[in-house]
Amino acid sequence: MLLFVFSSAPAFAGSDDVVVENAWSRASIGTKRPGVAYMTIRNNGDDVLTLGTVSTDLAAILEIHRTSTNDRGVSSMARVADLEIPPNGTIALEPGGLHLMLMRLQRPMVEGESYVLSLDFGDHGSVIVRVPILGFTSRGPGN
Ligand SMILES: [Cu+2]
């Protein structure tokens, strides 16, 4: 079952307890550089949730990444194949940590516009989220 929701409202995948909130992106610099998307994903269920595929028509390639900073202050990103959300747990995708990387943008990400993202939780269904695009220097909704 698929429900269409806006990021300001909770999203439910079928009868399961998946809630995606506070989704947002930053405006991109044209289409040559990748874009990013952030959100929180809450698992109100009793099973581990696994986020596998994420897709949007805005980007040809979309990956889950984790930014980490080593003890010399150098940051790097690594791909996360499957993002697990523990039962009754919340995972935050936020600047400096987990994020969705939108590569090979099909069009620029323009401040004030929005796009649709599909998050596939396998047996637990899919969640579709509308993601608002904030300014270049934004640190999140309301900032
Ligand atoms: Cu990345």
Image: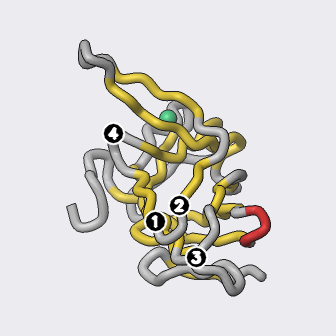
Image position, residue 66 (x, y; %):
47, 37
The answer for how far apart the CA atoms under marks 4 and 1 are is: 20 Å
Quarter holding residue 32: top right
The answer for how far apart the CA atoms under marks 1 and 2 are is: 5 Å
Image position, residue 35 (x, y; %):
50, 42
The answer for how far apart the CA atoms under marks 4 and 2 are is: 21 Å
Location of mark 2 (residue): 86
Look at discs 4 and 3 and give the one toward the viewer: 3
- Dot 1 amino acid type: Gly
Location of mark 3 (residue): 45
Instruction: Answer with mark 4 or mark 2, whichever residue precedes in sequence.
Output: 2
Image position, residue 125 (x, y; %):
74, 72
Query: Mark 2: few, some, or many residues within 10 Å (few <14, many ≥20)?
Result: some
The answer for how far apart the CA atoms under marks 2 and 3 are is: 9 Å
Q: Farthest top residue?
A: 72
Quarter holding residue 81: top right
Query: Mark 4: few, some, or many residues within 10 Å (few <14, many ≥20)?
Result: few
User: Mark 2: which secondary structure?
Assistant: loop
Quarter of the figure that contains the N terminus: bottom right
